[in-house]
Image: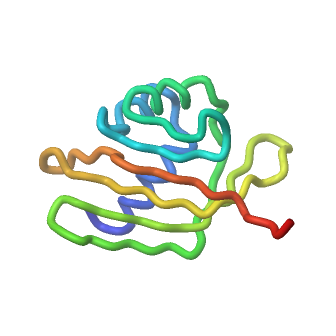
């Protein structure tokens, strides 16, 4: 998958409808998000996101793409997402995709870390 398509796919995970999200998440996925229950796996991740309002838009900065082996893509980036008049949500994120078949990719890992502050 070329870089432009990777970023379009990742954006669709933030802004797409729950059905699209459920289709894009692998049954063996692991996710870490900044809200309870924090660690999600497989269908639990897709189900949890179905109940979460989708973002209207998202911008990616500090984009990185690695391809450690054929059929495996790892990305990292800083996301700024917006919903209505809500201030932007920011997080540093990673996602890992695996290829199941030609042009068929699924998310097997995703994590979000909002900006950390010293206490």
Residue 109 drawn above or below residue 5:
above
User: Image check: 29 left or right of 50?
Assistant: left
Q: Quadrant of the N terminus?
A: bottom left
Give the image location of residue 76, x and y in percent.
48, 67
**Residue drawn at x 46%, y 53% as measured from the top left:** 10
Q: What residue lies at 45% left-to-right and 74% top-to-bottom? A: 64
Splitting the image into 4 quarters, where does residue 93 fall? bottom right
Pinpoint residue 21: horizontal percent, then vertical percent. Answer: 44, 34
Q: Residue at x 73, y 49 (%)?
A: 82
The residue nearer to you, when weighing 45 against 88, is: 45
From what the image shows, is residue 67 above or below residue 23? Answer: below
Position of 81 with respect to 108 (left or right) is: right
Give the image's coloring scheme.
Answer: rainbow
- Image check: 43 left or right of 16? left
Q: Position of residue 33 (x, y in %)?
A: 59, 45
- Of the 4 image quadrants, the one containing the C terminus is bottom right
Q: Residue at x 52, y 40 (%)?
A: 39
| Image height of 47 relative to 7, above or below | above
Q: How many marks?
A: 0
Q: Nearer the viewer, residue 60 or 110?
A: 110
Picture coordinates of residue 16, whole percent (x, y): 52, 37
């Amino acid at each position: 998958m070329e870089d432009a398509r990777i970023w379009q796919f990742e954006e669709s995970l933030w802004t797409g409808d729950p059905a699209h999200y459920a289709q894009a998440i692998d049954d063996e996925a692991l996710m870490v998000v900044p809200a309870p229950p924090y660690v999600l796996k497989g269908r639990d991740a897709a189900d949890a996101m179905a109940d979460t309002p989708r973002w209207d838009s998202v911008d990616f900065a500090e984009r990185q793409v690695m391809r450690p082996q054929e059929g495996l893509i790892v990305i990292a980036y800083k996301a700024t997402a917006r919903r209505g008049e809500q201030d932007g949500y920011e997080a540093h994120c990673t996602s890992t995709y695996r290829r199941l078949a030609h042009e068929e990719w699924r998310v097997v890992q995703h994590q979000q870390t909002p900006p950390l502050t010293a206490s």
